[in-house]
Amino acid sequence: MGLLIDLDKCIGCGQCIEFCPFGALEMVGGKVEVREGCTLCGACLDSCAYEALIIEELEATPAADESYRGVWVFAETKDGEFSRVAYELLSEGRKLADARQSELGAVCLGHDIGAVDSLIAGGADRVCVVDSPALADFPEDLCARKLAEVILEYKPEIVLAGATALGRSFIPRVAAILGTGLTADCTGLEIDPETGLLMQTRPTFGGNLMATIICPGKRPQMSTVRPRVFKPDAPDQTRKGGVIRLDFNSEGVTSRTKLLSFVEDLAETVKLEDADVIVAGGRGLEKPENFAMLEELAGALGAAVGSSRPPVDEGWVPYPRQVGQTGKTVCPKLYIACGISGAVQHLAGMQTADVIVAINDDPAAPIFEVATYGIIGDLFKVVPMLIDRLKNG
Amino acid sequence: MNIAVCLKQVPGTTKVEIDPQTNTLVRQGIENIVNPFDTYALEEGVRLRERYGGKVTAISMGPPQAEAILRDALATGADEAVLLSDAAFAGADTWATAYTLSRAVDKLGPCDIVICGRQTIDGDTGQVGPELAEILGFTFVSYVSQVEEIDGEHMRLKRLMGERYEILEALLPAVITVVKEINTPRLPSLRGMAKAKSATIPVWGAEELEVDGNKIGLTGSATRVIKVFFPQRTQRAEILEGELPGQVDYLIDRLREANLI
Ligand SMILES: Cc1cc2nc3c(=O)[nH]c(=O)nc-3n(C[C@H](O)[C@H](O)[C@H](O)COP(=O)(O)OP(=O)(O)OC[C@H]3O[C@@H](n4cnc5c(N)ncnc54)[C@H](O)[C@@H]3O)c2cc1C
Ligand SMILES: Nc1ncnc2c1ncn2[C@@H]1O[C@H](COP(=O)(O)O)[C@@H](O)[C@H]1O
C-alpha cells in the first residue's frame, strides 16, 4: 500500500515533483523517489505522461452493506425555522435519489418543530422528526447519538448536511459513532453511473486543488456541503410525503454540556448569506473609516457588506463579515469587490455569485479572472461616483 | 490538569500558486509550518497550565520531519512532546487520524483536556477534533473563544457558534477546538528554545500505540481520494473602457437591465 514508482516507466523527467503539494517527491539518481511527506493525495498521478506513478490499491475494499438505500438530508433549524441550506440540500439530494431510484428523506431533531410540509414541498418523500424538550437547546452529544441511532434503523445510503457552524461541529460526531467516512465542504456531488457510489468533490489545499472522494466500503456515505453551493428548487406544494415522528427517551440521559446563555452578534444587521447583493471591501480600503463609504454604497443598493480576510485580521470589521475559505460562502445575485485582489481563498467563498463586479487599480489582479465586469481604477474615485449616480439617478 | 494539544505540520500554502501557463503548482521554496490554527490551541494549553497547574503535551501525527513543529511547541511552552510516526499511518483520513491520536491520548495517561485547532489549512475539514472526542468518549465543544473558568469537574466556556456567542458548561474530560479570537500566541522564549534544542522527542509508531492495524492509515480510512485536479477558471471579465464617469454609467445601466439593482 502506498505510492509506487514504476522504475521501468519513469524517465526521470521530474514533472511530478512540481505537482506534489507536499514536496514529497525527489529525484534520486535519475529516477523519482517518494519521501515520507507523501500523504497519498494523488495530485501527482495525472502529471506523469508515462503512467509511472501508481497508488497501490488495498487488496480488497470490503463491500458496502447493500441494505442501505435512499438519500437523507439533515434539516437544521434556526429560531424555529429550517435553514435555507436544508432546501438547497433537498434539491441536490433529489437528483441523487432519482439517480439511485430511491427515496429522499429529511431528518430533524429539536423541540417544538412545527410543520414539515415545506421539506416535502422542497423534495422530500419522507420526513423523520425527533421532537423532545430534552433536545430544545440542541445538545450536540445527545443529538449525535440519536441521529446515529435513527440512521442505523432506517439505513439511508447517503446522508447530507450543511457545512454550517453546527453541521461542522455535530456531523463529524455522527460519522464517528457510525464509523463511516465524512467528506467536508463538498462543492459537487454526483453518482458514478458504473459503481453507484457517491462522488464527492471538494476544494482542498486552500482552494488550490479539487479532490474527488468516495466512501466505498462503509455506509452511509456522508458529506457536508457549504451553504449557497446548491440552489434550492422552487417549492412544489402539490408534492406528497410521509412524516414519521420518533420518540426520544430522555430518561437517565443527560448531556455533557449545558447551554447557560447566549448573545446574538448584533454587528450583523443583514445576514451575509441571505443577501442578494453584497458589497465587499479588501485591504485596498486601507483603513477602517473607509468602510463607511462601502456602507453608504450598500445602503444605496440595499446590500450587505462583506470583506476579505485582511480587514478582519486588522480588526476593521468583525469576523462574521469575512467571505472565503475560512469565512462564509456566499452566492448573491451581485457581488461588488472593492480593493480585493482575488486570492484563491477569497474566491472560494464568492465565485459562484451570478454577477461579479471588480474594482481594482491593478489590471493583473486575479479577481478580474472571475469577474463579470471589471473597472480598473482607484476605488476611492469609483465608489463615490457609484454612490452619487445611484442616489441622484 | 493534564492537557494535550494536537498540532499538525502543513505546507505553507500561501506560497503555493498555480502557474497559469503550465497549470502546475509553483512550489518555490515551499516550507512546512505548523498549522496556524494550532498555535492558538497550544497557547491556550500553556495558559491553562499557568492558571491551573499541570502539564501540556504536544502531539503530532506525521512524517519524521513533523518533529520540527514539536520542537517549536516545546520552545513556546509545551512541557513534553510526542511524535506519532509510522509508514503505516500514511494516507489516513480524518477518522483514522482521530483514532491514532486517541491511542496516543490514552497512552499518555489520565487527560483532562485535549485542545485542537479549528481546522487545518491543507485538509481543511475541522473533523479531527469532534471525531477524536467521540472516539475518546470525551465531551466536545467546538469554536471556543474563551475558557472562562475550570472548577472541579466542569469548565465554563464561551464559543462562537455561527452568529452567536454561547456560554456553555462542559463536563471534563473534554476535547475543545479553538478559534483565533481566543488568544495571541506568544513567541518562543530563550529558555524554551534552549530546552527544545536538547529535548528528545519520543516517536511512537503502530507498535508503541498498540493500534488496531485495520483502523490506521489508508487501510483504516473509509474515504478514498480518487482524483485530484486544478479548478478551472475560464471566464474573463469585461473590462470597462473610456472615462471613469462613462464606465460607472455603463455599469449601472447593465446592472439595472439585469434587475440586479
Ligand atoms: C489558510 C488560509 C485561509 C484564508 N482564508 C481566507 C478567507 O476566508 N477569505 C479571504 O478573503 N482571504 C483568506 N485568506 C487570505 C488570502 O490568501 C488573501 O491574503 C486575502 O484574500 C487578500 O485580501 P485582499 O484581496 O483584501 O488584499 P490584497 O491581496 O492585499 O489585495 C488588495 C487589492 O486592493 C487593490 N487596491 C489597493 N488600493 C486600491 C485602490 N485605491 N483602488 C482600487 N484597488 C486598490 C490592490 O491592487 C490589490 O489587488 C486565507 C489565507 C490562508 C493561507
Ligand atoms: N496529523 C495530525 N496530528 C495532530 N493533530 C492533528 C492532525 N490532523 C489534525 N489534527 C488536529 O485536528 C484539527 C482539525 O484538523 P482537520 O480536521 O484536518 O481540519 C487540527 O487543527 C489539529 O489540532
Image (spheres, coloured by chain):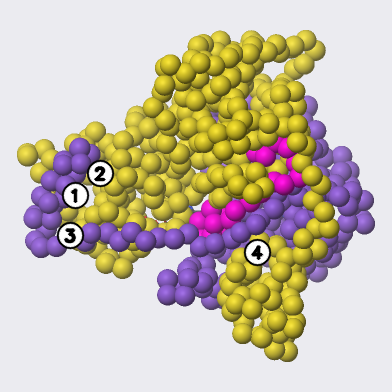
> Relative to the observer, which residue lies in front, B102 or A273?
A273
* Residue interval drawn in magenta: A203-222
Mark 1 highlights which residue? A383
Q: Nearer the viewer, mark 3 or mark 4?
A: 4
Image region (quadrant) for ligand 1: bottom left
User: Quarter of the image holding residue B173?
Assistant: top right
Q: Residues within 10 Å of mark 2 (few under 14, many from 20)?
A: many
Gap between marks 2 and 3 measured at Cα: 21 Å
Answer few, some or many: residues within 10 Å of disc 3's Cα (few below 14, many 20 plus, some between 14 and 19): some
Q: Secondary structure at mark 2?
A: helix
**Residue at mark 1: chain:** A
Q: Name the spot of residue A148 as percent of width and height, x first.
A: 72, 27
Residue type at numbered disc 4:
Gly
At numbered mark 1, what does the secondary structure look like: helix, strand or loop?
helix
In front: label 1 or label 4 = 4
Q: Which mark is residue B233?
A: none
